[in-house]
Amino acid sequence: MQEGDVGGRRKVESECVHCRSEAVWGLEERVRLGYPAPEQEEEIGIGQPCQTKEQKEEGHTMPEQPQPLVGVVMGSKSDLEWGQQVGRYLQELGIPHELRILSAHRTPVEAANYAQSAAERGLAVIIAIAGLAAHLPGVLAAYTWLPVIGLPLAGGPLRGQDALYAMVQMPPGVPVATVGLDNPRNAAVLAAQILAVRHSDVRVRLQQWRREQTESVRLADRQLQQSSATAVPEPRP
Ligand code: RP5
């Protein structure tokens, strides 16, 4: 990330969390960096292009947005942090995605429309995140033939058991591929594995990511062996 002064204005160059393009003037990014959020800037909506009014006036053209392959859907704004975590893992794997808030209970028509149009819009996988009586992934799965991955959240008085069972106990014929409670990484990796069957670029990145994961465990073990070889044993109580 770089910061500089452009035409008397502060410019923040970074990578867009949505499209991974450079030179983003994003509200989220500015707020994160502690800058005031000027009113004339258009707020970056979830899943919206990151280009701002300022950039448009300067004739700044953003690279074409890659077609999202994964739809990350949250049941509530209160799930946003989890959706963003899934997004970060997908980004690590170079998978274009979009984030949406659609509720199976509060906006059922929008949720159904989203699932019904997902395949024709080019999505290949849907990740649905919800807590409590988490019907969202099941409802989306009912309206699409695309694979739906359910990410149950461990909130509420039942600590997520309700969400887990709601997702994993789907009736025969309409499965939801349910990952562990509060496990955004597995949701993203599973989506990558599904995509890797047909998308060789995703396959290459996934395999590289797996090699790195393996290496990090080997490294941790080597470090443990080295430290225990030099460690002075604690006296027994
Ligand atoms: C679910 O209920 C959502 O997915 C969320 O995890 C939970 C609580 O929602 P809010 O009351 O915070 O909107 O539908």
Image (cartoon, rainbow, N blue to C red):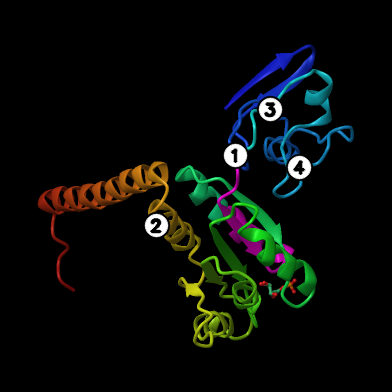
Point out the image quarter for the N terminus. Answer: top right
The location of residue 232, given as percent across then percent down, is 13, 54
Instruction: Say few, some or many: other residues with alpha carbon within 10 Å of mark 4 (under 14 / 14 to 19 / 20 or more).
Output: some
**Relative side of 9 to 189, left or right:** right
Q: Secondary structure at mark 1?
A: loop
Instruction: Say few, some or many: other residues with alpha carbon within 10 Å of mark 2 (under 14 / 14 to 19 / 20 or more).
Output: some
Q: Is residue 72 magenta?
A: yes
Q: Secondary structure at mark 2?
A: helix
Residue that appears at 60% across and 43% down: 67
Q: Secondary structure at mark 4?
A: loop
Extreme residue toward the top, this view: 7
Residue that appears at 34% across and 43% down: 204
Instruction: Assess whether mark 2 and mark 1 are in contact (beta carbons under 8 angstroms).
Output: no
Amino acid at pointer 4: Ile
Foreground of the two, 6 or 75: 75
Foreground disc of the pair 3, 4: 3
Extreme residue toward the left, this view: 229
**Taking 137 as reference, is 172 above or below it?**
below
Amino acid at pointer 1: Pro
The picture quadrant where one finds residue 132 is bottom right
Q: Is residue 81 magenta?
A: yes
Write down the residue under mark 4. 44
Circle nearer the N terminus (2, 4): 4
Circle nearer the N terminus (3, 4): 4
Circle nearer the N terminus (2, 3): 3
Write down the residue under mark 2. 193
Foreground of the two, 169 or 162: 169
Task: Specify the segment rendered in magenta.
Answer: 67-84
**Relative side of 30 to 194, left or right:** right
Instruction: Say few, some or many: other residues with alpha carbon within 10 Å of mark 1 (under 14 / 14 to 19 / 20 or more).
Output: few
